[in-house]
Amino acid sequence: MSIKFVLNETSYFGKGAREELPGEILKRRFNKAFVVTDKSLAECGVTTRVTEILDNAGIPYEVYSEVKPNPTIKNVTDGVEACRNSGADVIIAVGGGSSIDTAKGISIVMTNPDRADIVSLNGPSNTINRGMPVIALPTTAGTAAEVTINYVITDEEREIKMVCVDPNDIPILAIIDSDLMATMPKSLAAATGMDALTHAIEGYITKAHNTMSDMFHMEAIKLIFKYLPAAVNEKDDEAIDKMGLAQYIAGMGFSNVGLGIVHSMAHQLGAVYDTPHGLANAILLPTVMRFNGADPATAQRFREILCQIGRPDAANLNDQDVINTFVWMISELSKAVGITQRVRDVGAREEDFEMLADKAMQDPCKPGNPREVSKEDFVELYRQAF
């Protein structure tokens, strides 16, 4: 049985890496850029850190900044119209997963107009054409959208998050500049960092994991446990840089092997209550890992992780002690960066659990979970996290 692994073309890393942007645009002979970002980044000057480089190089561009934190179908359709009217030939995404995901959706529809309804992009895609070229400059250290084949768009009418999986959307260029990530407020840095940890852990235990993805995910887990607190609490330059790298390599892994039911459940909190995605993952991760650890093979995977993050004694612990230790370390990391919320704190209601569970059962991330899960399991997991 063969294993398919898809990676992006070119990436730059490090403080000030955005200075590489004009050279890449000119080398690729693009004439005009369509910059996709969100209002908060535009208003606080983060987007300007990128557009001023375009100005200095004499590269024309137009800005689309209507992206919501949980981007919607309307964000994409409005963006497609604005992009088409701009006459641009390259999209530059500046922001977190929301901006980059919106840019990917725009990119795909620009070259596959038969998917203009957006709804038909949900799930594994069979689009024919490579999307319009996208250059991604992430401002958060979490989603790894700049290197993955996935993007998530909210269908507000049905209150679901569509997980679109399409190799045709992968950016041609990623620029991971820690200067841009350093602008994150503490709460966002914490939530996106825990999002990256969720990607790495779920990717390490998912059914489809393989030697190559294991390599990426284990290294990401080690980096996040080591550097996330300093990146969030001290704004340490090295720690921010390492978190940018950690979330990127986690993305290289999970983009190819999938995720699990932390994401299946978190997607519903985002779709129904507009909960920020990273925060939803952080809240749910300990509860779901305790559930998954009941599978002996997954408990062994936890043991491997613990041995690499400062607990070599885990090699001699029984499965239950391994599960307890791993869940405790995840919870302590969340607390260290200020995440102490429960599901009830983000607006969830007990009377909604059946509805949320129904939606989670249909989520594309569910099949990758190492342990089979029923609707009743989902209801109980939401209740435990409540």
Image (cartoon, rainbow, N blue to C red):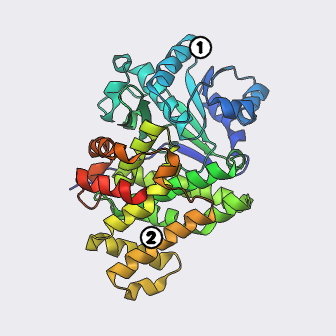
| Kind of residue sitting beneath label 1 | Ser
- The relative height of residue 67 versus residue 345 in the rendered view (above or below) is above
Residue under the image location 29 percent in, 31 percent down: 126
- At mark 2, the secondary structure is helix
Name the residue furthest top: 85
The disc placed on residue 142 is none
Q: Quadrant of residue 243?
A: bottom right
| Kind of residue sitting beneath label 2 | Val
- Circle 1 Cα neighbour tier, 10 Å, few/some/many (<14 / 14–19 / ≥20): some
Label 2 vs 1, first from the N-terminus: 1
- The relative height of residue 133 versus residue 205 in the rendered view (above or below) is above
Residue under the image location 33 percent in, 80 percent down: 319
Residue under the image location 42 percent in, 26 percent down: 108
Q: Quadrant of the N terminus?
A: bottom left
Residue on which the image places disc 1:
86
Residue 294 vs residue 211, the one in the foreground: 294
